[in-house]
Amino acid sequence: MDVRRADARYRGGDRAAGIESLHAFSFGPHYDPDNLRFGAVIACNEERLAPGAGFDEHPHSHTEIVTWVVSGELTHRDSAGHESVVRPGDVQRLSSAGGVRHVERNDAAEPLVFVQMWLAPLEPGGDPAYEIVHGIADSTPYAVPEAGAMLHVRRLGAGERTAVPDGSFVYVHVVRGEVWLDGVRLGPGDAARITDARDLEAVAHSPAELLLWEMSG
């Protein structure tokens, strides 16, 4: 298990424009050849947008983009004609496939915080696709078969425990709260990269929310 702490993330964004970004993997000008990906995950970005701030239209290709809103509301528009507002508890996925452009903004009056995870597809190409699941239930897995991955959302009360999925690669991101994972304490923004995960569990030290990616080899 390789633990990566929140304060070790690469800092990016544009504070003057109301954008603060924290990158868990090599990203943009923060190039680290030893931190390019884990399993299918090639990015896990914590984004903070002030009211009115956002990312203007920009392109993506050959990437599965999954977004989890922590607080606030995220407005999404893309070149395929999809437009939606993503709120806490929703899972949004943009399959950029052969190419798509999109806009991400905070059009609300309150600050926006979201976690965006990029996964590499098993095969390149194809047609762009978009999906949003409103209010996904706790412990309901969300499949991204294009990347050979499954997302598990876990919300735990203090003292509650949950099994960590077995898998060739498991990526655990702590959204909020604190948990013990295999004897290691993890706090908000911390992550664990687990290879050949077997018979592990997480125990909440305080009310917690976790995102766990279960990935094939």
Image (cartoon, rainbow, N blue to C red):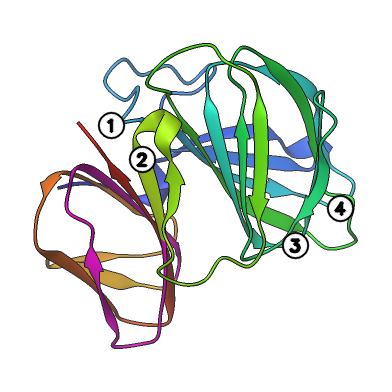
Give how far across and how far down residue 141 sits, in percent.
Answer: 41, 58
Q: Between residues 54 and 75, which one lies in front from this camera angle?
A: 75
Helix, strand or loop at disc 4? loop
The disc placed on residue 72 is: 3
Distance (Cα) linking label 4 and label 3: 9 Å
Helix or strand or loop: what does disc 3 sit on? loop
Q: Residue at x 63, y 18 (%)?
A: 127
**Any part of residue 42 in sight:** no
Q: Main secondary structure of the magenta part?
A: strand
Residue at the spot of label 2: 149
Tag shown at residue 39: 1
Whichever of callouts 3 and 1 sits on the residue coming sooner in the sequence is 1
Q: Which residue is mark 4?
A: 51
Disc 1 crowd rating (10 Å Cα; few below 14, some 14-19, many 20+) is many
User: Badges 1 and 4: C-beta atoms under 8 Å apart?
Assistant: no
The amino acid on which the numbered mark 1 sits, given as a three-letter code, is Gly
Q: Work out which quarter of the rendered image holds the C terminus and state it.
A: top left
Name the image quarter holding residue 211.
bottom left
Residue stretch in magenta = 153-176
* Above or below for 46 versus 121: below
- Residue 159 coordinates in the image, percent (x, y): 28, 88
Q: Position of residue 162 (x, y in %)?
A: 26, 74
